[in-house]
Amino acid sequence: MGYRCIYEQTVFYNPLNRFSVIRVKTDDTSVPQDARSTYKHKDHLIRFTATGFDLPQSDAVSLDLEGEWINGDKHGYQLQVEHCREIIPPTLDGVRGYLVSGLIKGIGEKTAACIVERFGVKSLQILEQSPEQLLEIKGITEERLEEIKASYAESRVMRDLMTFLSPFQVSPNTVTKIHQSLGVNSLTILQKNPFELCRFSGFGFKRVDEIAQKMGCRVDAPERIRGALFYMLDKKCNEQGHLFLEKAALCRTTMRLINGGIKQKEIRVQSEALDNQLQSMILSGHVVAYKDSIYSKRSFVLEDETARRITEILLEDAPEVDISLTLTQVCKQFSLRLSEKQILAVKTAFQHNLSIITGSPGTGKTTVLKAVLEVWKVLNPASKILLTAPTGRASRRISESTGMDGAKTLHSALGLVGGDVDNEYEDGDSIDADLVVVDETSMADMWLTAQLFYRLKPGTKLILVGDADQLPSVGPGNVFRELIACRLIPVTVLDQIFRQAKDSLIAYNAKFINENKTSLYYGNDFIFIDCDNEKETAEIIRQVYLEEVFQSCIEKVQILSPYRSDGEASAEQLGFAIREDINPCAPEIPELRVGAKTFRIGDRVMQTKNKGEISNGDLGFIRSFNHATSSDPATVTIEFSDARFVKYELNQMGSIKLAYAMTVHKAMGSEYDTVIMPVLAKHMVLLYRNLVYTAITRAKRRIFLVGEKDILFMAIHRCRIDDRNTMLGVRVTQYVKSLTLQARLNGSAQIEQMKLTG
């Protein structure tokens, strides 16, 4: 139903997504009684509240509002606007009032008066159809005209886009992202090809297909088939960590997707039609085919350009330097005892501009890194060193273990604002450092690795440190293992367990697990508790957790689970149960409900996205709830490690979750004194050797495994660490061979200078 109204006041406006709550007045008596303001006014007009996206906030125009009445309980009935049309009085004063209303940037009172004087009541028609005529107005330059056109077009496009998408329950935030990505032609693009929505989070193919079917899209329409191919390529790569899919697998899964639910065989999409569309996408450059492998354009560029940059580094001339004497002095000064392999690792780092140090816990990676840094500081006192890691906890740990302050997350060091992007590379300056050390490199996916190599200056020395036997990155790619496997980058594998770890069964059992052995040692620091079912397992985990926390402290004990939310032994369910043991509901403990989440003062929580100085994975405690005032919104204060107190507005609490228990993936890059983990047949789909290995190596002093020992042994015998579709190592090998051949043909002496070791 529509209502002719006049704007009166703004109740709420979010400049980020342009969501508005406005009060309007009308003489339309069809407005429901429950929606009307109870206050009386001299003009006797009816007041009500309207909510919507980018609603005009000026009384210079009348508004035609169409929408649905929604009972907001606390706020009463409000008109949820689905369509808004501005009604501008066809008079000189009406047109002038609209131009100076502030709805169009770049037009002030003087400029509006000049426009109306020149074009009269046709001023808005000129603005709509031939805005270049506004250049006749004194003070309107080409640059200012572009601002006016952009403001006018954006306001119209955003409103029309919201109108188009609102029947499909698309939020204003999502509409903003779509507009920012597709630009001023976003509505036209979506009307022509709604499957462009598959590019955006929350739009699965089936949801978009429903929208397209309502718009009359044919089952065998080319845009539908291409949309399904794009969606399936992106979905499988993100879910399974691939950078590409084999053509046969992509076509097979896409055929199931687009023909699912279509009962009439005669209208189903045929394989020939799908093959033709895929070939068209390849020829147009929308996807890349390498032999029988299909990449998204973005994934191919990330992998290929990173391989080229790595090849350039391998062919750089590293300055020759004899560090033997300095290394001896450093070892004496810091009481470091290095094995032959550790000495080799230190020397290799100085001989090449790119090298790798890998090994399991207790094999001396930190000792080697300490030696490298101290020797470097002696030999290059004026140079700059950057220590970094993929997560905040890992970066702080490398600072603590090496004694060097200032370690950063990779996102922070590279000047990235967080999350994934559509472009191959984010804009940013080169890394201002002469030596760069990346710890926990196995956690870095292809996108983040590409940013790193893209920003390295020529001649910068890069040392990648990590444990190749841990879980690979959450995002697509298997970078660390690929670089090791290509055998062109100097790699030192530390495999000797040293004295400080020799009494640790954790270190020995980690080594056995990597060797596919199930004859594990059990004792005070490696404990297995047998259980018959999930309920009993969850109960024992709660008991063990409380006992361990009582003996030490909550920060040193962590529950890890293979599953995030399914079952009593999942991370979320264990977390809820533990919270009731550790921080139960009580009248004296304030609670705050944000969406579906409930938080209490004292809750142990985790940040799940990068936010300024707080990184994804950082742990802290809720210290206070701060009520809203007339000038400030309601906030939650969280204390993170190192006494970092951060205030969160309620709309930012979506990135906060309880942290009494977490998934094994979330714990990567972290260490805890005590780790407790369920091992159940129910979790078998995720229980592989590298997941078990990653979980137990998070424990520094004690690990409790609770569940079925047979399942543990089965998991140790299952390894899927290499099943990702990536070719970074292959590409590095190809480019090195290509440049080597070229150098030989040119008679270059550079080949003799290449000292690459396997």
Image: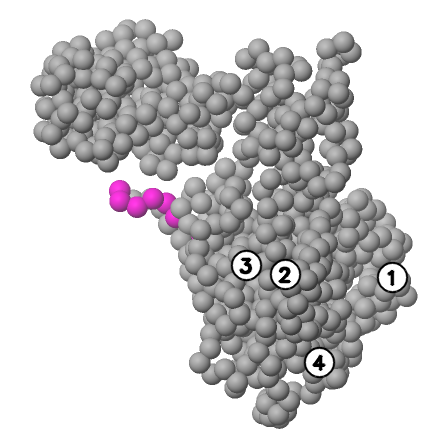
Location of residue 267 by image quarter: top right
Location of residue 248 by image quarter: top right
**Callout 3, which amino acid?**
Leu
Q: Which residue is mark 2?
A: 311
**Callout 4, which amino acid?**
Leu
Taking the image as shown, residue 302 lies to the left or right of residue 36, namely right
Q: Which residue is mark 3?
A: 452
Q: Which residue is mark 4?
A: 344
- The earlier-in-sequence mark between 4 and 3 is 4
- The earlier-in-sequence mark between 4 and 1 is 4
Image location (x, y in percent) of residue 152: 28, 25
Q: Which residues are magenta?
A: 630-637
- The earlier-in-sequence mark between 2 and 3 is 2
As helix, strand or loop, the secondary structure at mark 4 comes to helix
- The earlier-in-sequence mark between 1 and 2 is 2
Magenta stretch, main secondary structure, is: loop
Give the quarter of the figure containing the N terminus. top left
Q: Residue at x 13, y 14 (%)?
A: 120
Q: CA distance from mark 2 to mark 3?
A: 14 Å
**Callout 2, which amino acid?**
Thr
As helix, strand or loop, the secondary structure at mark 2 comes to helix
Q: Which residue is mark 1?
A: 516
Residue 453 versus residue 475 in the image, above or below: below
Q: CA distance from mark 1 to mark 2?
A: 34 Å
